[in-house]
Image (tube, rainbow, N blue to C red):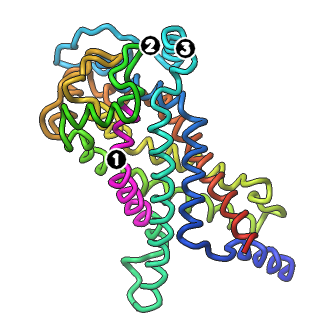
Amino acid sequence: MNNHQGNRTKKVRAYVSPKLSSFETSICGAIAGGFSRFVVAPLDVIKIRLQLQPGRSNFNFRSKHQSISVDRKYNGIRHALFTIIKEEGPRGLWKGNLSAEYLYISYGAVQFLTYQKMQDLFKFIEKRQDNKLIFNKTLQPFISGAVCGTAATVATYPFDLLRTRFAAQGDKKIYEGIIHSIQNIRSQEGFYGFYRGISASIIQIIPYMSLTFGSYEFFKKSFQHLEENYLRLRLNDLKGTEDLISGAMAGIIGKTGVFPLDLLRKRLQIQGPDRSKYVIKNVPLYTSSIISCIKQICKEEGFLGLYKGWSPAIVKSAFASAVTFFVYGYVKRILEKSH
């Protein structure tokens, strides 16, 4: 019995495999990000548009403040889906996908490379320090996730802003393409225009990626514990089942924890001279601090106004995270076998 369990443990540990180079890790992340983006694009477009429209939610708490009176263009996921297809055709569900692909490919490459470097740094520190409290193994993926998310966000933020603006425009286009959008923003808003909302993005991404990678590693280790002690078959032998389940759970936990900041980020990204020209024409003007913006949304739209678009966001985040970690793990194993 002990011998059988020992063999199974060796099999699980053997999965750690040879280490990839920095370039190979970046390739894995880029492929995972690009593939994930393409399959979740429709949910992302729906989520962004639901996040952008003001007005109170159908279900809300009582408030002493007066509701703002607006016409809601979309009433839920299904209505948004059919409205977009009717008015813009099926291609409308992939609005901004080119800039989004650039974003996800570059973001994935930077994110996973930075995560690997952080893991290497922790191993280096552990070998040279007796006090490991600050670098406790349980905290390492949370810290690494926060750092890699921040690095990837700063490195790719203009693509994120363009993705949001393309997804927000309807048939009457503000931007004809990537080049035109860059020229337009630079001439009308200056360099700062490419970084509108970056403060909210960084504040959001630190806990988001911390929770995502921390949760992912937690579920992966939980599965490995089950496999070592109770299961006869490794879930990852079933074509990356571990990665899919762990990734989906991590996506749900991460997005739920920071959703209000994600909504605020989207609204800040379309501020500027063309704010009223998007498909959602009555997005409020936000000119103050992040805290003031949150207070304004709560006052005018109620507390649940901070959670507009939550349903498609959770579905999208779970699916995107599952696909990203699955594809990353799949490509990683292929490259490892080639060594």
Residue 146 spot, x, y in % from top left: 38, 60
Quadrant of the image containing the N terminus: bottom right
Amino acid type of the residue that numbered disc 2 sits on in the rendered structure: Asn
Asked if 337 appears above or below 307 in the picture, the reply is below
Amino acid type of the residue that numbered disc 1 sits on in the rendered structure: Tyr
Residue 75: give its label. 2
Asked if 38 appears above or below 278 in the picture, the reply is below
Sequence-earlier tag: 3 or 1? 3
Amino acid type of the residue that numbered disc 3 sits on in the rendered structure: Gly
Residue appearing at x 80%, y 74% in the figure: 8
In the image, 263: left or right of 252?
A: left
Residue 157: give its label. 1
SS at mark 1? helix
Magenta segment, principal secondary structure?
Answer: helix
Residue 135 spot, x, y in % from top left: 41, 77
In the image, 300: left or right of 216?
A: left
